[in-house]
Image (tube, rainbow, N blue to C red):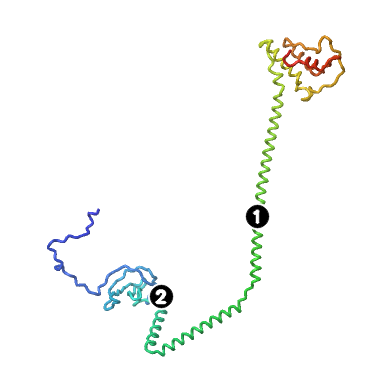
């Protein structure tokens, strides 16, 4: 694409610019340009308002015999949007602005007119003072007198305001204290409300926790009761009896262990837990002189197991009565341990 852009034109070797004919255009020729209204204006013909920034297709020309420091001045022609009346204005390089010339009036120009009037008065005064020294003295006297009057008027206004305006300091303090009291009450109410909400939440949580704990305790108690009803601690002693097919030898050994356990500790099924350990004192019974202690023969068959167990319980519950003249060592030697039989 860069090759298609022609930046330099081709000039042949025999080119002579003096031979090019020159156009003789008039100096006051006009061009059609697109512009925006430089200020707010009102048409004199129909009274239509034209706001600043409205776009127009205008004709532009150079003003003849008018220059400002070598800068040309241009004139623009536009038409009213309502009645098509011609409106003209031109550039003002001295004030860096535009000047209305004909066909309309410029709006919002009061400040500019006042500034122009002040400039004119100041310029006239300087011209008078330049030629008349007595006028300078008079003007200074007038200025000082006017300044004194302005200061006096300002002081009178201040005194008048201080006289009429009375500040009620007590009332201000009372209002401030009332506002502080209302603010403290509001904060206290908010704190109480927040505290109440927190206590309600904690109470609800505790109730829920207590309900859940009670439910857990009920479940645990029910499960323990079911377990105690189903599983007894003496089931291991009463169950799993040996069968005749296992042999009389194994059954005899297990029955002997059970009998020795019941003689030493007692049964858990009947009475209290310590019922077998408490022994009532009975009258002395006649004891066979043949031996220090009656021995119980171990059952040899499965059918005699119940009778032997009952005999062992009665023998364990009954105390051993020593003979006359026997000592405690003889009683200790007569006591048989679990597997001695």
Q: Nearer the viewer, mark 2 or mark 1?
A: 1
Mark 1 Cα shell of 10 Å, populated few (<14), some (14-19), many (≥20): few
**Mark 2 to mark 1 CA distance (whole Å):** 64 Å
Residue 206 or 77: which is nearer the viewer?
A: 206
Residue 93: % across, % down: 33, 74
Q: So how many labels did they put on this image? A: 2
Residue 259 falls left or right of residue 147:
right
Instruction: Point out which mark residue 331 bears.
Output: none
From the viewer's side, name the closer residue of 183 and 275.
Answer: 275
| Quarter of the view holding residue 52 | bottom left
Asked where in the image residue 55 lies, by quadrant, the reply is bottom left
Residue 223 drawn above or below residue 251: below
Which quadrant is the C terminus positioned in? top right
For residue 107, which numbered disc appears in the image? 2
Residue nearest the viewer, comparing 143 with 168: 143
The correct choice, above or below, for 40 with respect to 203 in the image is below
Residue 172 position in % (x across, y down): 64, 69
| Residue occupied by mark 1 | 191
Q: Nearer the viewer, residue 226 or 126?
A: 126
């Amino acid at each position: 694409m860069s090759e298609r852009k022609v930046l330099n034109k081709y000039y042949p070797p025999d080119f002579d610019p003096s031979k090019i004919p020159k156009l003789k255009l008039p100096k006051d020729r006009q061009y059609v340009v697109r512009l925006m209204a430089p200020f707010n204006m009102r048409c004199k013909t129909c009274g239509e308002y034209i706001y600043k920034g409205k776009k127009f297709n205008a004709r532009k020309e150079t003003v003849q015999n008018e220059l400002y420091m070598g800068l040309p001045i241009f004139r623009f022609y536009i038409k009213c949007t309502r009645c098509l009346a011609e409106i003209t204005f031109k550039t003002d390089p001295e004030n860096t602005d535009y000047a209305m010339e004909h066909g309309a009036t410029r709006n919002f120009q009061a400040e500019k007119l006042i500034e122009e009037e002040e400039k004119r008065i100041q310029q006239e005064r300087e011209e008078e003072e330049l030629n008349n020294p007595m006028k300078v003295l008079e003007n200074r006297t007038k200025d000082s007198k006017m300044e004194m009057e302005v200061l006096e008027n300002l002081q009178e206004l201040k005194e008048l305001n201080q006289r009429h305006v009375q500040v009620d300091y007590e009332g201000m303090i009372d209002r401030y204290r009332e506002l502080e009291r209302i603010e403290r009450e509001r904060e206290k109410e908010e704190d109480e409300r927040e505290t109440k909400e927190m206590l309600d939440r904690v109470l609800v949580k505790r109730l829920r926790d207590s309900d859940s704990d009670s439910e857990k305790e009920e479940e645990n108690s029910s499960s323990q009761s079911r377990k105690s009803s189903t599983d007894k601690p003496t089931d291991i002693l009463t169950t799993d009896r040996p069968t005749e097919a296992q042999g009389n030898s194994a059954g005899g050994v297990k029955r002997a262990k059970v009998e020795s356990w019941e003689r030493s500790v007692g049964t858990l099924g009947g009475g209290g837990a310590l019922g077998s350990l408490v022994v009532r004192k009975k009258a002395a019974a006649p004891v066979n002189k043949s031996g220090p202690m009656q021995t119980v023969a171990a059952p040899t068959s499965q059918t005699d197991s119940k009778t032997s167990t009952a005999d062992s319980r009665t023998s364990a519950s009954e105390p051993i009565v020593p003979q006359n003249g026997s000592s405690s060592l003889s009683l200790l030697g007569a006591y048989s341990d679990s597997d001695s039989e």
